[in-house]
Image (cartoon, helix red, strand yellow):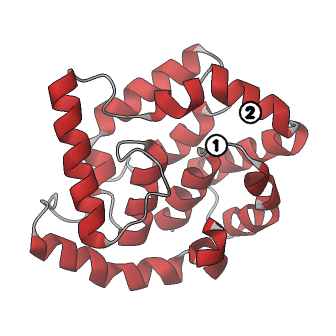
């Protein structure tokens, strides 16, 4: 069920436009199917915040505290050349899997979460766990409601990985594609992955 957490967090961490508010019933249904635990409670907490916050209020917060999404770029703290190489590597990885980033920078947390959900694999999130902790600290220091979404993602990474970390090879990408079918079934609501969700 981690795939549901990652997909829901990916949507909730994206720019808060009207589509996000329209997806609330779908997200509530998907989160309600999760087992009780930290991830579900944190997602519910953010959905509660969404219900009582008008779109303009959340948009202002996202632009101010999250700097229009820039705070969510997990490679942004690196030196320029290292940052450029990291983003190029991620873009190549997504292209190999035919993962449409929907105009998100490749190192944005929403893009990584969606990739993890489609692959049903947490290796990319684990690879950026230090940056994820840095993001959590930054959001927590600002008292941001987005902090709980990062906590939901962190909760899925508390368990030891089931397999050795995968490297970006043709074999690894084929394995990711093979696991995608299982991820689709695990997502509880097929609408999460329908093309219409990108319209």
Residues under numbered marks 1 and 2 in contact, where contact means CB atoms less than 8 Å apart: yes
**39, 188: nearer the viewer:** 188
- The outermost residue toward the top is 141
Compared across the picture, whether 162 is left or right of 17 comes to left
Q: Position of residue 161 (x, y in %)?
A: 26, 58
Identify the image quadrant of the C terminus. Answer: bottom right
Front residue of 15 and 119: 15
| Res. 178 in view | yes
- The residue positioned 64% from the left and 48% from the top of the image is 12
Q: On the image, which quarter does residue 86 sit in?
A: top left
Q: Is residue 136 above or below residue 98?
A: above
Image point (61%, 64%), residue name: 35
Left or right of 72, for residue 107: left
Check the image and report above or below for 20 versus 86: below
Q: Earlier in the sequence, mark 1 or mark 2?
A: 1
The numbered dot on residue 58 is none
Judging by the rendered image, the residue that carries numbered circle 1 is 15
Q: Is residue 135 left or right of residue 148?
A: left
Given residues 29 and 89, the one toward you in this image is: 89
Indicate the position of residue 32 as horizontal and vertical percent values.
Answer: 72, 65
Mark 1 lies on a secondary structure that is: loop
Provide residue 177's location: percent of width, then percent of height.
Answer: 29, 79
In this picture, residue 170 sits left or right of residue 102? left
Residue 9 is situated, as x and y percent measured from the top left of the image, at 57, 51
Q: CA distance from mark 1 to mark 2?
A: 7 Å
Q: Secondary structure at mark 2?
A: helix
Categorize mark 1 by other alpha carbons within 10 Å: few (<14), some (14-19), many (20+).
some
Residue placed under numbered mark 2 in the picture = 59
Say if 5 sits above or below 38 in the image: below
Tell me which residue sits at (46%, 48%) in the image: 104
């Amino acid at each position: 069920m981690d795939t549901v957490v990652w997909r829901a967090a990916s949507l909730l961490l994206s720019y808060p436009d009207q589509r996000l508010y329209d997806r609330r019933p779908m997200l509530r249904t998907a989160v309600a199917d999760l087992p009780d635990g930290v991830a579900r409670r944190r997602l519910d907490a953010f959905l509660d915040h969404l219900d009582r916050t008008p779109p303009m209020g959340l948009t202002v917060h996202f632009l101010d505290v999250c700097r229009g999404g820039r705070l969510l770029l997990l490679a942004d703290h690196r030196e320029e050349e290292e940052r450029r190489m990291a983003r190029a590597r991620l873009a190549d990885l997504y292209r190999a899997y035919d993962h449409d980033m929907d105009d998100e920078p490749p190192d944005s947390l929403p893009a990584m979460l969606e990739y993890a959900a489609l692959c049903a694999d947490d290796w990319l999130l684990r690879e950026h766990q230090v940056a994820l902790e840095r993001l959590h600290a930054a959001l927590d220091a600002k008292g941001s409601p987005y902090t709980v979404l990062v906590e939901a993602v962190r909760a899925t990474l508390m368990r030891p990985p089931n397999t050795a970390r995968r490297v970006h090879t043709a074999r690894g990408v084929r394995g990711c594609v093979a696991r995608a079918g299982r991820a689709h079934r695990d997502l509880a609501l097929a609408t999460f992955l329908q093309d219409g969700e990108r319209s």
